[in-house]
Amino acid sequence: MKRRYALAEAAVSCGSPTRGSEGAFDALIQAGLPGLLGDAVLLPMEKLAPCGTWPEGLRHLDTVMEVCRRLRANVLTALERGEYPVVIGGDHSCAMGTLAALGEFYGADSLAVVYVDAHTDINTDQSSVSGCIHGMDLAAACGLCCDALTVGKNRVNLLGENLHIIGARSIDPPEYGIVERVGAHLHTAREVRERGLEAVLAEVLPALAGKRVHISFDVDVLDPSEFTATGYNLPDGLTLAQVERILRGVLGTGQTVSFECVEYNPALDRGGKDLSALMGLFRRLAAGLEG
Ligand SMILES: [Mn+2]
């Protein structure tokens, strides 16, 4: 039986240097996303006060963690009601809230994450140069960060071997070491280009067997020729068709338990071109979000 979708808002942008992605949920709702998802349940979030000046250290820690705590509670509510969470960021720091709920509900050991992103987001609070928390969510999920970045009662402790990053092309030097240390699977945009996407998927998809899978899709994985309404426009990205193929392949395993789309910034979307692209992608995937 099809589960009902729960569209959960993660109204946070100050885990990143760019304001505006906290408006993505409202933009997608207005564009008709709930209808596409069979009249999804809405789990909106009260917007917190705008982030002020740029603090030192872990940037806007309190705001980011407050959003993550609220998101964790909302995602848990959806899971307990038997709904299928679709989280709309916000910047990628919200993944800490989503993964806290998923780890708690399903058990971290049985959880795999397919992370489609131009970045690896696996800096710890120690290795990060920028202090931006949206670059630390995977390290936090793997239990590598300080307690201040723990969302629920306990760390998630996702196993690195269950982490599959696809499309990365902006990776900080320390992140390579962290990826290797935790045993995560990194498939860079360059690898996708050189070996072909099908070769990459032929490794990723079988490795998901027996797991419950969370898809975390950062729109900045897309090439700027097709999508620019996001904080980073990095050349040599993936095409919309490639992203659709990845998502369809992972959804096709029938093992996905949740989906997350982050970093769309409507404030940077002149004429709503990228909103249309994103809605098109959702439309083509809607039937198969549950696999
Ligand atoms: Mn990113």
Image: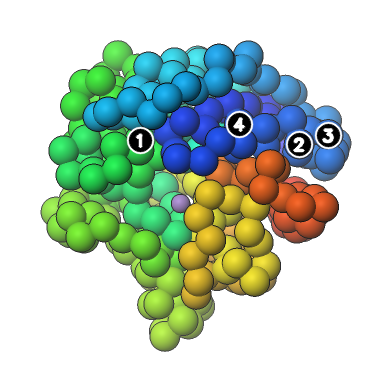
Colour scheme: rainbow
Q: Are marks 2 and 1 in contact (CB under 8 Å)?
A: no
Amino acid type of the residue tagged 3 in the rendering: Gln
Packing grade of label 1 (10 A; few <14, some 14-19, many >=20) is many
- The residue identified by callout 4 is 22
Q: Nearer the viewer, residue 108 or 254?
A: 108
Q: Secondary structure at mark 4?
A: helix
Q: Earlier in the sequence, mark 2 or mark 1?
A: 2
- Tag on residue 30? 3
- Tag on residue 63? none
- The residue identified by callout 2 is 27
Residue occupying the point 51% across, 41% down: 18
Q: Are marks 1 and 3 in contact (CB under 8 Å)?
A: no
Q: Is residue 112 left or right of residue 182?
A: right
Q: Are marks 3 and 2 in contact (CB under 8 Å)?
A: yes
Q: Nearer the viewer, residue 18 or 200?
A: 18
Q: Nearer the viewer, mark 3 or mark 4?
A: 4
- Tally the marks: 4
Residue occupying the point 47% across, 22% down: 52
Q: Earlier in the sequence, mark 1 or mark 4?
A: 4
Q: Nearer the viewer, mark 1 or mark 3?
A: 1
Packing grade of label 3 (10 A; few <14, some 14-19, many >=20) is few
Q: Secondary structure at mark 3?
A: helix
